[in-house]
Amino acid sequence: MASEFELIARHFTPATPGPQAGVAFGVGDDCAMLAPRPGLRLAVSVDTSVANVHFPADAPPEAIGYRALAVSLSDLAAMGAEPRWCLMALALNEDDDAWLAEFARGFHGLCRTSGTALVGGDVTRGELAIGVTVMGEVPPDLALSRAGARRGDVLAVTGALGGGAGGLVLWRRGERDLAHPLLARYLMPQPRLAAGLALRDLAHAAIDISDGLLADLEHLLAASRLGARLEADALPLAEGLVEALGGEEAHRAALSGGDDYELLVSLPATALDEATRRLAGLGLSLTPIGVTSTERGVAGVALDGHHGWQHFQGGGE
Ligand SMILES: [Mg+2]
């Protein structure tokens, strides 16, 4: 195996050397030195993606690199934070230069399009796993927490639901075309960063849907000490989901499937039109799916004990 230094130098040095915004020095010294803008809070989150738990080990390496960063950035989106920097720790078994090059291409590609600078990395030998820490900036009074929802708020979701779970089912069936909309949703999810920024002065609370709509809704409601009534028929289903899974399973995927990385926001009814208009300007839909209430629990959907997130597991369905 090439030395850690060689691997980092070859694949994880910024594509365009030179000063990066807010980075006094980045990859290559003992620490990165960062310069957050005065007056802003630093929002920080870490996620670890483990092969055959969070993604298939034989997924395209470009997608694995992209996805590892995307799932972390999704947490910044949910806070209304603007991404600035990330750190990446990679464990891998083989010294496969072509694999690493593709992995780095996916990772750096999303760094570029999201405005995130990779400021430090660590490569070690082990079962394939990627830990990504992201740091973003947000004005203190605009950060979206899970705890801010208020009674009578409208609950709304960006984009469409069930695509992550649908893509996982297709992957297990042998579908390998990343152009398939469901597989793209599963392996190349788009963190809703622009939506988080657009909604942060309108919404009372937000969470990203990583564990499934119901599970994450319950996190938001618990933090806000509220309940909700959902309109089950209002859930926006991902493109191709009903065709792939059938109506009943599609509905279940939208309610309980993981890996969607859409935002669930709680906002005053009076702000819904403006919020919808802003997201339309970003090419993204915002769908009201229910309202908060003081009665605890979630009404309006049939819970069947299946809800919650299902990790990827190798093998058949
Ligand atoms: Mg989250």
Image: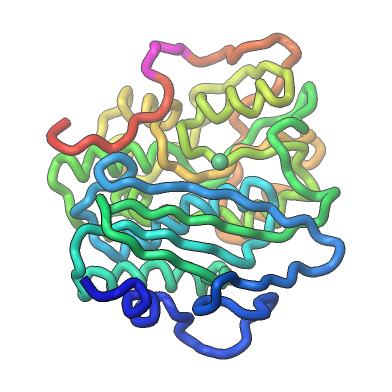
Q: Residue at x 34, y 30 (%)?
A: 310
**Left or right of 24, for residue 37:** right
Q: Which residue is at the front of the view, 255 or 8?
A: 8
* Protein image colouring: rainbow
In the image, what residue occupies the spot 84% across and 67% down? Answer: 38
Ligand 1 in which quarter: top right
Report how many numbered discs are placed on residues in the image. 0
**Quarter of the picture holding the N terminus:** bottom left
Q: Is residue 274 visible?
A: no
Q: Residue at x 58, y 70 (%)?
A: 31
Q: Is residue 248 placed above or below 159 in the rendered structure?
A: above
Residue 71, visible in the rendered structure: yes
Residue at point 62% right, 87% down?
19
- Specify the principal SS of the magenta part: loop
Question: x%, y% of residue 259?
Answer: 41, 41
* 1 versus 240 height, above or below: below
User: Horizontal and vertical percent for residue 279?
Assistant: 64, 54
Residues in magenta? 302-306
The front one of 61 and 188 is 61
Front residue of 229/210: it is 210
Q: Is residue 42 above or below residue 250?
A: below
